[in-house]
Amino acid sequence: MAKATQKRLYLTRHAQAEHNVSEDYSIRDPPLTQLGREQSARLHEDTVDTIQQSAQLVVTSGLRRTLSTTVIGYATLRKRLEVEGKPVIVLPQLQECNYLPCDIGSPREVLEADPEYRGLDFSELTPDWMSKTGFYASDDGSLKARARWVRRWLRERPEQDIVVVAHGDFLRYISQGYNSHEPWANVEVREYTYAEEGDEDARVVFTRKVAQEGADEPTSSTVAGPA
């Protein structure tokens, strides 16, 4: 198992989705736009010979915009890992922050029935994953706790290089411990590692920017206010 300070986490924001364009956050679990799908394809082109050859695990939020970004943007990596018996893990703890329709996912059975997502591992999607209550609540304390859980979960995984596909607001909680509202563009990939071994908060530090295929589209906290 790799030391925490030797791990490489490739934190990836999803491609452009319908709510990013219209700023209509009442759209339930919005899909990618056509531009978003093109951005994801460019991500594939730009990383196919680098991190898609080295990464050992892919985990993604269960919302449609992250699932589609993963399937298109990391297609070669996904195929390689599936051959090794390691399908993409759909991790509900990576869902976006706010209690708005755009940040609430779809039922597991609906996603599993979608041909685009065939082969992804949805076993972590428990019935409460769409509730936005308890562990998934949208208040600042709950979000900090969930981000810490994710950092610890990733740290305990045996893989050294892990691709994580999630959302702008929650990626800031993961990487900074709070929502700084600093820009994180669509399909922007940043590499992080752990600050130190055994850190209770499992804090991470920025290493480098890997790719960026889109613009700094707004997140739902634009209308919901600071989390």
Image: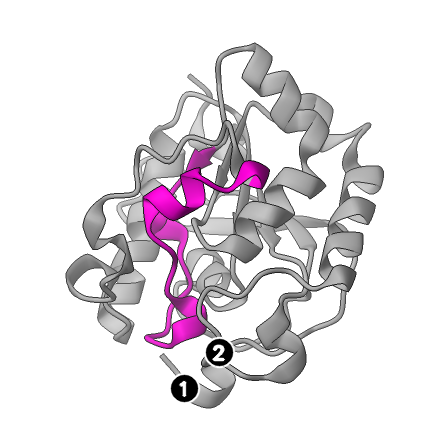
Mark 2 packing: few (<14 Cα in 10 Å), some, or many (20+)?
A: many
Which mark identifies residue 224?
A: 1
The reply to whether residue 202 is in sight is: no
Q: Residue at x 61, y 56 (%)?
A: 14
Q: Is residue 103 magenta?
A: yes
Q: Does residue 86 appear left or right of residue 70 in this picture?
A: left
Quarter of the picture containing the C terminus is: bottom left
Callout 1–callout 2 Cβ contact below 8 Å: yes
Taking depth in this image into account, of 81 and 189 the one nearest to the observer is 81
Q: Helix, strand or loop at disc 1? A: helix
Q: Which residues are magenta?
A: 89-116
Rendering quarter of residue 153: top left
Q: Residue furthest left?
A: 134
Q: Is residue 88 above or below residue 79?
A: below
The reply to whether residue 213 is in sight is: yes
Q: Is residue 214 magenta?
A: no
Q: Does residue 179 appear left or right of residue 36 in this picture?
A: left
Q: Is residue 122 above or below residue 103?
A: above
